[in-house]
């Protein structure tokens, strides 16, 4: 009996589900991978599953076929699941859909734990973005990730931003909030930065954030002298996600904490001044695909005190943020905005 070798092609990938349930910055950082998936599988259906508050971040993305929430998944036979969340809920969701081929983001939380608790850095030399770590999950399916982050405000969102900002003066967007205290530059220091920049040049200052940030915006404005207040407009808590995106798109420079709005600004190639307190670059959350300058306080043995941030400084001094000089930050803002006008 003569044996016959039968060669079959690998199963076709015609339907892909990408899962990242939260949060703003993490979801924005998935968009380069989504674009590379679309390039690799131009004819495939590519759906995205995320929590309802974050669906607008993916609206209008031409690389996606549809966007769903965990409560509204379609009846589709997916050939591949790309789980970029990799937690209990995302694994249960993929399992419930019966998807047999699964690629998952490896978080390597043990490295974060060793760095936070024992200051043992096993991340190695050189910076590796979370985007590159997402890409690892798809090694062999897509090439190295060269796409940038992307957001797609609607014409109505852009019309809204145009009505808010008009034209003429350079616009400094200030993203002063963050979910945790140790990621927030103090409000009085933001006020000092704005006062110094506003006294040195004509500009518009835009305060951006969610509803939870609106009181902080009020305190920043109240801390300003009268002549500076007229240059500042707070939109914190007054915009949708993509209205905020459209305002960032029209800004000339963005000053920000380690927050989701930082990554939203990177989707438009904005120049960023990034303030890191308890955050460190080893965690991989620096802006992707845009110019930025990282401002941090070097030489603190207590950094990082957490990989997500804390509600108070465990050392009691908060030098990681209070060590950042408002005059230095204001000087750099003035230099960068002046350079755009020459």
Image: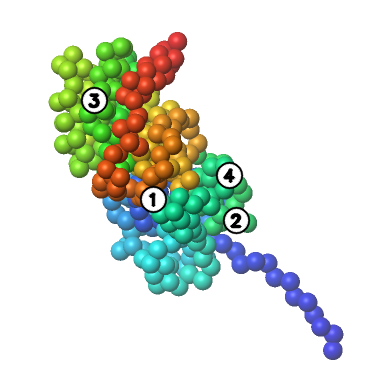
Return the disc, 4 or 2, that comes first in the chain's sequence. Answer: 4
Quadrant that contains the N terminus:
bottom right
Foreground pick, 180 / 341: 180
Percent x, y of residue 62: 45, 45
Q: Nearer the viewer, mark 2 or mark 1?
A: 1
* Labels 4 and 3 touching (C-beta < 8 A): no
The structure residue drawn at horizontal position 53% and vertical position 68%, both measured from the top left corner, is: 101
* Labels 1 and 3 touching (C-beta < 8 A): no
C-alpha separation, residue under disc 2 versus residue under disc 3: 46 Å
Say which element carries label 2: loop
Q: Nearer the viewer, mark 4 or mark 3?
A: 4
C-alpha separation, residue under disc 4 versus residue under disc 2: 21 Å
* Labels 2 and 1 touching (C-beta < 8 A): no
Residue holding disc 4? 125
Residue 202 in the image: above or below residue 173 = above
Residue holding disc 2? 139
* Residue 283 visible in the snapshot: yes
Residue holding disc 1? 307
Q: Residues within 10 Å of mark 4 (few under 14, many from 20)?
A: few
Return the disc, 4 or 3, that comes first in the chain's sequence. Answer: 4
Residue 41 in the image: above or below residue 231 = below
Return the disc, 1 or 3, that comes first in the chain's sequence. Answer: 3
Residue holding disc 3? 191
């Amino acid at each position: 009996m003569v044996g016959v070798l039968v060669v079959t092609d690998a199963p076709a990938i015609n339907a892909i589900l990408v899962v990242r349930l939260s949060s703003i910055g993490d979801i924005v950082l998935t968009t380069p991978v989504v674009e590379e998936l679309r390039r690799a599988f131009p004819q495939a259906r590519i759906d995205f599953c995320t929590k309802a508050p974050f669906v607008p971040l993916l609206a209008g993305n031409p690389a996606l076929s549809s966007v769903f929430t965990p409560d509204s998944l379609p009846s589709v036979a997916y050939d591949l699941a790309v789980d970029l969340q990799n937690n209990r809920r995302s694994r249960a969701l993929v399992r419930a859909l019966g998807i047999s081929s699964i690629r998952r983001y490896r978080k390597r939380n043990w490295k974060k734990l060793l760095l936070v608790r024992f200051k043992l850095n096993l991340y190695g030399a050189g910076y590796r973005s979370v985007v590159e770590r997402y890409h690892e999950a798809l090694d062999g399916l897509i090439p190295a990730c060269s796409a940038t982050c992307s957001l797609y405000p609607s014409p109505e969102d852009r019309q809204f931003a145009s009505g808010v900002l008009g034209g003429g003066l350079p616009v400094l967007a200030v993203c002063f909030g963050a979910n945790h205290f140790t990621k927030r530059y103090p409000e009085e220091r933001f006020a000092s930065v704005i006062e110094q920049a506003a006294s040195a040049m004509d500009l518009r200052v835009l305060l951006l954030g969610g509803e939870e940030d609106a009181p902080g915006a009020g305190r920043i404005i109240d801390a300003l002298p009268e002549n500076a207040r007229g240059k500042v407009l707070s939109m914190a808590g007054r915009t949708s996600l993509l209205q905020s995106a459209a305002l960032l798109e029209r800004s000339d420079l963005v000053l920000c904490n380690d927050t989701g709005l930082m990554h939203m600004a990177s989707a438009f190639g904005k120049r960023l001044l990034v303030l890191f307190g308890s955050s460190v670059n080893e965690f991989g959350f620096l802006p992707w695909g845009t110019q930025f300058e990282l401002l941090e306080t070097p030489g603190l043995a207590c950094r990082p005190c957490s990989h997500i941030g804390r509600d108070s400084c465990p050392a009691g001094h908060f030098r990681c943020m209070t060590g950042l000089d408002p005059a230095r930050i204001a000087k750099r803002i003035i230099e960068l905005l002046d350079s755009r006008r020459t």
